[in-house]
Amino acid sequence: MRTAPFPPLSGMALASAMALTAGLAAPLQATAGPSAQALEQGRKIAFTRKLGNCLACHHIAGGTAAGNIGPPLVAMKQRYPNKAKLHAQIWDATVANPETPMPPFGRHQILTERQIDLLTDYIWSL
Amino acid sequence: MNQESPKMKTLSLFRAAGLALVLTGLANGPALAGDSAQAQYEDMYQQAKAAQKRAASVEGEWRDIGKFLKKAQALAKKGDYEAAFKLARKAYIQGKLGYTQALSQQKVDWPSYFK
Amino acid sequence: MLKRIITLAGTLGLCLSLATPAQAGPKEDLARFQHFYLKRFPGVPLKEFANGVYAIDKVSRENWEAIEEFPPYEPYVEEGKEMWNTPFKDGKGYKDCFPDGPAIKADYPRWDAASKRVLTLELAINECRQAHGEKPLKYKKGPIAILTAYIAWESRGKPTHVVIPDDPDARAAYERGKRFWLARRGQLNFSCATCHAQNAGKHIRADILSPALGHTTHFPVYRSKWGELGTLHRRFTGCNKQVRAKPFKPQSEQYRDLEYFLTYMSNGIPLNGPGARK
């Protein structure tokens, strides 16, 4: 599902991608929740126009001039008891609802997998 | 989409080599000999151009594909085949995605909110 | 009051026509389209949709009305009038190509059976110029927007009345335009309908998404964002870029077909160009 049938990254590209991922992933613990630093990275992705730009459509606490196309992002753990479902929604919301206005951030590679992971953790913390 | 070709095998080898480099902490070293990196880039560039054309043929080309390819060419000229390859690959993927998207929309009709 | 009854009757009529299982065609599309917006924005009469966001949002409307007191497009209308009256090198003028001019905006876009394509005002202007040995004008801004601003000004008040003739080629062009409007495109995966129907009236960041009904009536438009006039196809280009799709060329078949469909959807709404927008 998540890996599209594209030619593999070349050695060099993969090497640097892995180096990057390893570098970013380092501060994350396997079992404990995301670190404050990771959540801040996620928040930045959500608030930055050229990245997630979630504020274009969703109200988020701490964000200004938010749109109202989508529901406000509050009580996310109640709305998505299963974090994987939230992840899937961000990845490609058209799966759950073909008429959704929400861009498929993962399927269309608007964000990287790593960015979507960080974003999911942040949104889930709201 | 491709059969396993000698080229693919070489690619896999490179991948393994790249991985080994990361694992041994040598990621910053020159990973590949110039010639093969160039060949890999050029191959990807051609594939990306073809994907762009295919997307355009169904009116599905995305905005930045052309920009990525231009930048890739400029980087390749400077010899930075690694960065050039990445951009060409991005263009290639976007070409594929735009094509798929356009095909999926060819029979659109009024959505439910119009009914 | 009477007006209200008429509007209500009209709305009911639309509902009825939706209920009857008629052959789906442009007429049914038109009823469906206008009904959608009239239902979404109750109390906004059809004619008012010519004013875009200002028909549905009070605060935006106040700002706009203040701008309209000294319309930013006014000098262009004057300049356009001069252009209209300036003879070509061969001594002829626009009036020779457009005997009914300058108030001809409502005659476009239309199906040109001879050339089997949608003929827009801008295309007709350039073909006129070329027939008289003049260079064609660029299609997004500048002289073409200035000249059409004058034509639009003179055409104000005439109702939009695009005709889709009973001609398979015309019908195909209409259907292409409709599909263009409904199809998701670009990396962000939006269709025209996503923003300007499904979410019309909602906020995207601080901006309000305009209803597509009435989109075509006020062009060319002076946009504060541009600081100048621009054509409808310039606006199409901008929209496509915003959804991260590669835009088509102004006056391409794609955009002319889209204009054909979109203008037809506003049939009945009086022209009010040139307009002023954010």
Image (cartoon, rainbow, N blue to C red):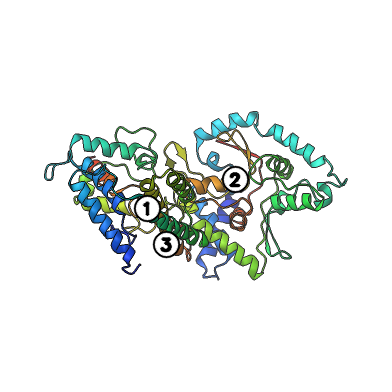
- In the displayed orientation, state which residue is furthest to the right: C91
Q: What's the mark number on residue B100?
A: 3
Residue in front for this viewpoint, A85 or C28: A85
Residue C50 location, x and y as percent?
Answer: 60, 45
Query: Looking at the picture, which amino acid does disc 2 mark?
Result: Arg
Identify which residue is drawn at 64% across, 29% down: C69
Which quarter shows the N terminus of chain C? top right
Q: Which residue is mark 2?
A: C234
- Badge nearest the viewer, 1 or 3: 1
Mark 1–mark 3 Cα distance, whole angstroms, equals: 33 Å
Q: Quadrant of residue C140?
A: top right
Q: Is residue B61 left or right of residue C159?
A: left
Q: Is residue C111 left or right of residue B37?
A: right
At mark 1, the secondary structure is helix
First in sequence, mark 1 or 3: give its number.
1
Q: Which residue is mark 1?
A: B35
